[in-house]
Image (cartoon, rainbow, N blue to C red):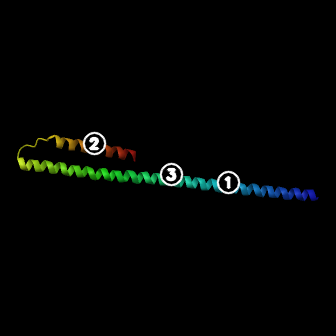
Amino acid sequence: MYYYHYYYFYNFYYYYYYYYYNYCFYYYYYYYYYYYYYYYYYYFYYFFYYYYYYYYYYYYYYYYYYYYYYYFYFNYYENHNTNYIPNATAILVLLLLVLLLLVLLLLLLLI
């Protein structure tokens, strides 16, 4: 009889320890995946902010060169009062505008 109660108590202790260990394991498992999800959410948010910042950076410089290209165009046209023939600087600025537009489209595709 004593052996039976000892075995019953030992069995109860073993199952209690097993469920406690199982609970700790699932708690650690949940904590790990919560941290994993938080890390990747922060990673995605950082790169979204990064591409958003560079999108507006290239957008600003696109209009910056666009403004100076047309400023140069109208200034040259008003000073010479002839048909405008673009020189090498204006062609380079136009190529730079095309390059910035391609980079902007690439960034939009990456987002």
- Mark 2 lies on residue: 99
Residue 23, x across and y down, in percent: 69, 57
Judged from the image, the secondary structure of the residue bearing numbered disc 2 is: helix
Distance in Å between CA atoms under marks 2 and 1? 54 Å
Residue 12, x across and y down, in percent: 82, 58
Query: For this view, does 31 lie left or right of residue 78?
Result: right
Q: What number is the disc on residue 10?
A: none
Query: For this view, does 6 lie left or right of residue 102?
Result: right
Judged from the image, the secondary structure of the residue bearing numbered disc 1 is: helix
Tag count in the figure? 3
- Mark 3 lies on residue: 40
Judged from the image, the secondary structure of the residue bearing numbered disc 3 is: helix
Dot placed on the residue nearer the N-terminal end, 3 or 1: 1
Give the amino acid type for the residue marked by disc 1 in the picture.
Answer: Phe
- Mark 1 lies on residue: 25
Q: Are marks 2 and 1 in contact (CB under 8 Å)?
A: no
Residue closest to the eye, 88 or 94: 88
Q: Residue at x 39, y 45 (%)?
A: 110
Give the amino acid type for the residue marked by disc 2 in the picture.
Answer: Leu
Give the amino acid type for the residue marked by disc 3 in the picture.
Answer: Tyr
Dot placed on the residue nearer the N-terminal end, 3 or 2: 3
Residue 47, x across and y down, in percent: 43, 51
Residue 78, x across and y down, in percent: 7, 50
Q: What is the quadrant of the N terminus in the image?
A: bottom right
Q: Residue at x 15, y 51 (%)?
A: 71
Distance in Å between CA atoms under marks 3 and 1? 22 Å
Q: Are marks 3 and 2 in contact (CB under 8 Å)?
A: no
Distance in Å between CA atoms under marks 3 and 2? 32 Å
